[in-house]
Image (spheres, rainbow, N blue to C red):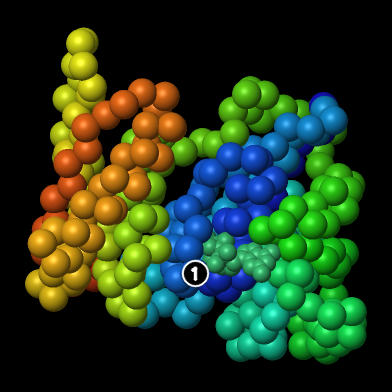
Amino acid sequence: MKAGFIAVVGRPNVGKSTLINKLVSEKVAIVSDKAGTTRDTIKGILNVNGNQYVFIDTPGIHKPKHLLGEYMTNSAVKILKDVDLILMILDGTQEISTGDEFVMERVMEARRTPRILVINKIDKLTDEQLQAKKEEVAEKLGKFDGIVEIAGEYGIGLAKLLNAIDPFLEEGIQYYPEDMYTDMPVYRIITEIVREKILLKTRDEVPHSIAIEIINVERRENGKDKFDINIYVERDSQKGIIIGKNGKMLKEIGTEARKEIEILLGKEIYLNLWVKVKEDWRKKKPFLKELGYFSED
Ligand SMILES: Nc1nc2c(ncn2[C@@H]2O[C@H](COP(=O)(O)OP(=O)(O)O)[C@@H](O)[C@H]2O)c(=O)[nH]1
Ligand SMILES: [Mg+2]
């Protein structure tokens, strides 16, 4: 058995979570077109051909603007020194930006950790554009222990990516049982599902202003379990957006989330969603701790 921890880093929206979900064939990380979707480091575990790949999804690394952002960037950067390999993901459809360079600087700080560059979203690139992208990488980002081109969303290039990772795995180790595909507790997956449904339906500041907390679970011997879940927002106006006209939006969010949670749990449930205003919660450490962020300090 060979195994290794592989940190997947990059600026927001390059496709980190999509790639890991595809690799492990299960949804471990929620995905949306909004930057800042992933707030925590999440492990997706792949067992194949006697190799165990432990991919660590990270929040996009960016210059933090608030306490939650600081937590997100710090938790991504902290793990870089401890992993066997870093995959730095680029969105091939975008020019390499100061955002990518900021990520690269963090990667370089973990000096001894090998790094592979992954150019993603090649489904949208011509051969010429891909070639130009590689030249841009060499010029703006510097040296890597390998470069791989993929389209994570469509599963293109994933076998090559695993081949490129293999030399960096450690011999004689298995970190997790073979049937385990994530380290996320089931309650955490449930709150993430609710958050994803909201992210997909909202825009501007709303997606960033949401926190989800399970406040009560009623288990019933005969009948469906009942979940009460709070959706926190930062402003009254955001509460209005999420509830929607005659409660329509909240109802849709609830139905979509319930269906996915039922698949996860393998049984039907009742799901009650409540929208609460908690002003500026992203700046309040005690509340962030209550939600499970900053849990280690
Ligand atoms: N065209 C294309 N879009 C992709 C690909 N991978 C991810 N995306 C899209 O990019 C957006 C951000 O993806 P996500 O995985 O949440 O990015 P993250 O912030 O880096 O985790 C989503 O809208 C994805 O559907 C890809 O291979 N091709
Ligand atoms: Mg993500």
Query: Is residue 283 or residue 20 the one in the foreground?
Result: 20
Residue 128 lies, in percent from the top left, at 89, 85
Residue in front for this viewpoint, 11 or 127: 127
Does 82 sit left or right of 172 as displayed?
left
Q: Is residue 254 visible from the viewing direction of this image?
A: yes
x, y (%) of residue 296?
Answer: 38, 47
Which residue position holds label 1?
33
| Local secondary structure at mark 1 | loop
Q: Is residue 173 above or below residue 288?
A: above
Q: Is residue 3 above or below residue 290?
A: above
Q: Position of residue 102 (x, y in %)?
A: 60, 81
Q: Is label 1 within 8 A of ligand 1 (CB to nearest ligand atom)?
A: yes
Q: Is residue 286 visible?
A: no
Q: Is residue 175 left or right of residue 69?
A: right
* Residue drawn at point x = 30 percent, y = 77 percent: 205
The quarter of the picture where the N terminus appears is top right
For this view, does 176 lie left or right of residue 129? Answer: left
Of residue 278 and residue 155, the one placed in the foreground of this image is 155
Q: Give the residue drawn at x 27%, y 29%.
A: 269
